[in-house]
């Protein structure tokens, strides 16, 4: 039996990844004695029964299944605390892993169509001698995981609505700063994040960023609510992706929101309830705005999938007063903007909507150096992933390519959202 290790998970623009492996070496080692090439990392992602998962080769090649296993690339190694904090001398060694899009060091996968947390079974082998306080170390093997830390997600708690006809689970964050009544930010997940584990609804994408100190400061503290559907928001009862524009979860979602607000009645500012989400969640955002045009202070649909043909002229007239900021990419071939967001946005403008904006990108490119192409160029994500821009608060330009202004000052989407209040 080998030695123990810990994993540290970071929620990134492509969801959660094990970014650090912390090895319990059992004796103190100095920084000068540790190097990345002294270890080898191999991992297999496994099902509950222990079998190696057969997973889609990539997001674009869902029909090709391959065994999910391979080697991790170590980019740095150093003595550390058990929590992975760098030290000049310590009894733990942390291995920082290189981020690789859809790499095997992600604990999230979709073996049955919906994302779920799976077991990443690591085997870390020492390949070079390391001097330590107890003498030379050699041949150590670490293959027993003693725990994981995902600090961004630890801020969230879970609940379940009491709506008898269709109770829904949800994750939520309560603001730690500010005072008085605070706004509520609702995030509706995409199709892949449905299921029975609310953690997936806010950690499957970088939704946890809405609870970060920087974003919370914009709102003076804000509640974050991430409901989860057992299937997908566009399910109209048929279990299929259709073009009806209806959802079997409409009443259940509104009941959940109302119940959450009631439970936090003294703390939530009901004039500042914001709703948004991506893809299927963008669909449901628009569905909720159309169904409840006087309830939300603003909406921020991303690559939204409510086909414009299902929105009547009366609906447009009823929601033209609602502040909405759309986000989409022209390269999106999953939810084509010319069938959904573009015509809806243009109809709202023609109807006289004065507080509607649209950040339309050509493609989705990594702006923060997280991932790179083989030649070192910024990584180009799938065109559907425009939620990456929104959740990083990179949306600043309007449909005409000019900055969005509030009182003459340029604002980002989230800066704009924080200033909206229902009259």
Image (tube, rainbow, N blue to C red):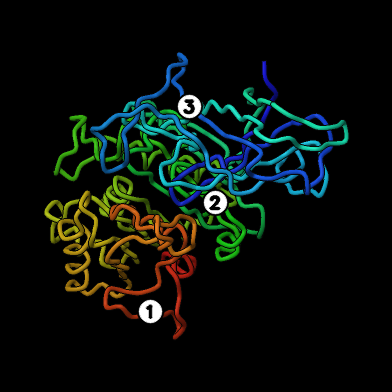
| Dot 2 or dot 1, earlier in sequence | 2
Which residue is identified by label 1?
A: 403
Q: Provide the secondary structure element on which disc 2 rests.
A: strand
Q: Position of residue 357 (x, y in %)?
A: 31, 70
Query: For the residues marked 2 and 3, what is the alpha-carbon distance in whole angstroms?
Result: 37 Å
Query: For the residues marked 1 and 3, what is the alpha-carbon distance in whole angstroms?
Result: 46 Å
Instruction: Give me the residue at 29% from left, 29% from top.
Output: 65
Is residue 161 among the parts visible in the rendering?
no
Instruction: Give me the residue at 32% from left, 62% from top.
Output: 327
Label 2 CA crowd tier, 10 Å (few <14, some 14–19, many 20+): many
Q: Provide the secondary structure element on which disc 1 rests.
A: loop
Residue 288 sits above or below residue 117 on the image: below
Q: Position of residue 202 (x, y in %)?
A: 47, 43
Q: Residue furthest bottom?
A: 408
Is residue 353 among the parts visible in the rendering?
yes
Which residue is identified by label 2?
A: 223
Q: Position of residue 57 (x, y in %)?
A: 32, 36
Which residue is identified by label 3?
A: 44
> In the visual, does 298 lie left or right of 306?
right
Residue 308 sits above or below residue 74 on the image: below
| Dot 1 or dot 3, earlier in sequence | 3
Give residue 51's quadrant in the image.
Answer: top left
């Amino acid at each position: 039996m080998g030695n123990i290790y810990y994993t540290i998970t970071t929620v990134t623009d492509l969801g959660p990844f094990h970014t650090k492996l912390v090895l319990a070496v059992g004796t103190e080692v100095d920084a000068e004695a540790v190097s990345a090439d002294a270890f080898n990392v191999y991992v297999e992602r496994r099902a509950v029964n222990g079998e190696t998962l057969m997973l889609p080769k990539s997001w674009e090649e869902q029909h090709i299944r391959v065994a999910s296993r391979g080697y991790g690339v170590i980019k740095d190694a150093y003595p550390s605390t058990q929590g992975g904090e760098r030290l000049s001398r310590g009894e733990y060694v942390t291995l920082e892993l290189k981020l690789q899009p859809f790499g095997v060091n992600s604990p999230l996968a979709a073996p049955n169509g919906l994302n779920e947390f799976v077991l990443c079974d690591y085997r870390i082998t020492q390949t070079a001698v390391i001097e330590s306080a107890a003498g030379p170390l050699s041949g150590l093997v670490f293959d027993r995981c003693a725990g994981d830390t995902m600090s961004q997600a630890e801020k969230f708690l879970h609940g379940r609505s009491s709506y008898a006809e269709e109770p829904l689970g949800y994750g939520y964050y309560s603001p730690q700063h500010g005072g008085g009544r605070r706004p509520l930010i609702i995030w509706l997940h995409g199709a892949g994040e449905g299921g029975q584990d609310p953690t997936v609804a806010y950690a499957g994408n970088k939704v946890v960023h809405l609870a970060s100190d920087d974003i919370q400061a914009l709102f003076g503290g804000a509640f974050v609510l991430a409901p989860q559907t057992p299937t997908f928001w566009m399910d109209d009862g048929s279990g299929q992706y259709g073009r009806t524009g209806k959802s079997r979860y409409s009443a259940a979602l509104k009941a959940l929101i109302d119940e959450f607000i009631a439970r936090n009645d003294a703390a939530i500012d009901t004039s500042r309830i914001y709703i948004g989400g991506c893809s299927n969640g963008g669909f449901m955002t628009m569905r909720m705005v159309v169904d409840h045009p006087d309830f939300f202070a603003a909406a921020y649909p991303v690559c939204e999938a409510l086909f414009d043909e299902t929105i009547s002229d009366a609906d447009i007239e009823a929601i033209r007063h609602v502040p909405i900021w759309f986000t989409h990419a022209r390269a999106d071939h999953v939810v084509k903007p010319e069938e959904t967001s573009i015509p809806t946005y243009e109809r709202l403008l023609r109807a006289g909507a004065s507080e509607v904006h649209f950040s339309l990108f050509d493609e989705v490119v990594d702006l923060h150096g997280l991932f790179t192409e083989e030649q070192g160029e910024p990584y180009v994500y799938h065109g559907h992933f425009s939620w990456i821009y929104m959740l990083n608060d990179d949306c600043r330009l309007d449909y005409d390519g000019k900055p969005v202004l509030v009182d003459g000052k340029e604002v980002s989407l989230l800066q704009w959202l924080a200033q909206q209040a229902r009259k």
